[in-house]
Each structure stands twice: as C-alpha cells, then as structure tokens.
Image: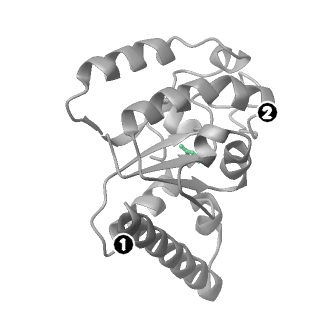
Amino acid sequence: MLLVRGMQREWKSHEKQWNNCQKCGLHKITSRHVLVRGTLPCDFLFIGEAPGSIEDILGFPFVSPAGQRLDKLLGEIDKPFSYAITNVVACTPRIDKDRDEIREPTREESTSCRPRIIDLLEMARPIGLVYLGRVAERFASKDSRLRKIPSVALKHPAYLLRLSGEQKLSEETRFANQLTQFIEEVQDGS
Ligand code: URA
C-alpha cells in the first residue's frame, strides 16, 4: 500500500516517531495511528480529515467506501501523476472509546498532528496539495508552510458518496474536472 522510493531510512524513522505519538488524547481511543498510503515522494499529496473505523482496523487512510470512491475518481483522471494520501489527524476521533461514532477532530488535535504532516511533506516533496473537505482546507489555511505549496480544495469523497442521481454525476464530474485542471496547471508550471 505504501511505496517508498529511496527513502527507507527516513520512512522508518517517520513511522517509528508517529506510530508512537501521544501528543493529544486521541491515541487513547484509537487502535492504531493511520499515517499514509500511496507513493513517496509523490507529485500530489491528498489530505483528508481523519481515519474512520475501517481505516482504524486496516491501518491505511481512505480504505473505506469513501476511499474506494476516491480511488475510482483518481483512476479516471486522464493524466499521469503520483500521489500519497493522509489525513489532518492520524488517529480516529471517536465520540468515546466504546462507541463507533466518529466526530470531527478538534482544533487542538489537528494542531498536535501538524508536525507529522510537516515531517511527511519533507519526504513527499509534492508539487501540489489536494485538500479533501473543509476540515483539511481550514487546517491548511492556518499554516504558512502549507500555504506556500500550490493547492486545490475539493469536496470530501464521503460527501460524494451520499449523493445520488444527477447531483452525484455533476459533483463527481466537477471533482474530476477541478482536479485535472489543477494537475495540468501545476505540472505545466513545475
Ligand atoms: N477516511 C479517511 O481516511 N479520511 C477521511 O477523511 C474519511 C474517511
């Protein structure tokens, strides 16, 4: 699920550091830290909100039905590009330890996880960032290091999954068009 080209040592140290992270209370209610999937380094780094219960079991970001939707949409983009996917926070923000209800990560939790994203950026060295949903977009707007990298904010795949009929078709087409345009712009300018 994760392909690391020529940076095994950096990856091992990233994994070791962040798999043991206790910077916020989420580590107490998650089964594991869900770091990243895809290719490192990569052209584009996608940032979602937080791992859900399926990600918490499988250990990789966006492997639930929302992730499968995302993979399908990415597979239909008619441009070659490499990518990796992560979330604003690495741990599943349950409402409480014994209930499988997921909430948005708090501002403090997102801030605590920011050094992980910055560390990942150093390995990923992306030419563009793709924010999935408003939590990721808001998170990025607060960080000057993220703001320096060209970015686009798209609808969250879980939102697309909830739509049906015409609206689904038109929102998914919009997602694909916005992403294709962004990839072209960034690749042409790099
Ligand atoms: N799965 C993830 O990994 N992140 C999300 O934001 C939603 C589902």
Residue drawn at (27%, 65%) of the image: 80
**Quadrant placement of the C terminus:** bottom left
Q: Secondary structure at mark 2?
A: loop
Q: Is mark 2 within 8 Å of ligand 1?
A: no
Q: Viewer-proximal residue, 141 or 13?
A: 141
Question: What residue sits 55% from the left and 47% below the top?
Answer: 47
| The quarter of the displayed image where residue 132 is located | bottom right
Q: In screen coordinates, is 121 left or right of 87?
A: left
The amino acid on which the numbered mark 1 sits, given as a three-letter code, is Ile
From mark 2 to mark 1, how far is it between C-alphas?
33 Å
Q: Where in the figure is residue 181, as x and y percent of width and height?
A: 47, 75
Q: Nearer the viewer, residue 56 or 22?
A: 22
Labelled disc at residue 77: 1
Q: Are marks 2 and 1 in contact (CB under 8 Å)?
A: no
**Above or below — where is 88 with respect to 160?**
above
Q: Is residue 68 left or right of residue 93?
A: left
Q: Is residue 179 visible?
A: yes
Label placed on residue 106: 2
Q: Residue at x 75, y 40 (%)?
A: 104
**What colouring method underlies this structural image?**
one colour
For this orientation, the residue located farthest to the front is: 189
Rate crowding at label 1 as few (under 14), some (14 to 19) or many (20 or more) other CA atoms within 10 Å.
some
Looking at the image, residue 62 lies above or below residue 96: below
The crowding category of the residue bearing disc 2, from other C-alpha atoms within 10 Å (few below 14, some 14 to 19, many at least 20), is few
The answer to whether residue 58 of the structure is visible from this angle is no
Above or below, comparing residue 43 to residue 146 in the picture:
below
